[in-house]
Amino acid sequence: MRLDDIAPSEGGVWYLASPYSNYEAGHGAACQHVAHVAAQLIARGVLVFSPITHSHPIGYTGLLNPKELPIWEELDLPFMEMSVGCIVAMLPGWQNSTGTANEIRWFVEQNKPIVYLEVDEWWDSEVDANAVMTSMLPKRDKKPEPWPAPPDAQADHAAKAAALAQADNPS
């Protein structure tokens, strides 16, 4: 199905499935690319929830393992349950994505509609999502101050960062 074939949402939100864990361009690109797909759908009146655009920044900020599927499946399930159906963004590698396959299987078992969205005709994988987002943000004279983390959270965050760095680069 093509983008223009999807009718605006009437009374519900669609779940937007897409590849992530083994995305050939990396996790950041997977998030940017599906964010572009989500924006195109939303601009056309199709309400979507994208678990990748929701969870990627949370995972990286909180130093959660992006490949630990049980964490993400538990988080995504309530959104899947509330969705009217699933739109599968056919981004590169979607056919080999374990997470996408699990999501499709769940929607089939629940007898909810699944739409396979072809993105190759309008998708530019070289889109600079950061530049697009920056151009859309209001101009500010000064960068807002971040909220400080509680001292115990800072220590916990540093310990998790060190453990993940060690796991990524074993000696």
Image (cartoon, rainbow, N blue to C red):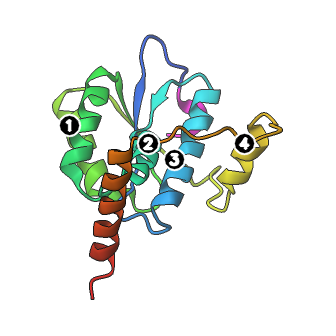
Seen at 83% across and 38% down, the residue is 141
Residue identifier under label 1: 106
Q: Is residue 1 left or right of residue 55?
A: right
Residue mark closest to the camera, 4 vs 1: 4
Residue 104: quadrant of the picture: top left
Considering only order in the chain, which callout, 2 or 1, is on the residue closer to the N terminus? 1
Regarding residue 86, the answer to whether it shows in the image is yes
Q: Which residue is mark 4?
A: 143
Q: Secondary structure at mark 1?
A: helix
| Label number found at residue 43 | none
Q: Residue at x 36, y 60 (%)?
A: 158
* Nearest-to-viewer mark from 4 and 3: 4
User: Which of label 3 and label 2 is nearer to you?
Assistant: 2
Between 75 and 97, the one nearer to me in the picture = 75
| Percent x, y of residue 115 | 40, 36
Q: Quadrant of the C terminus?
A: bottom left
- For this rendering, which residue is in front, 48 or 155? 155
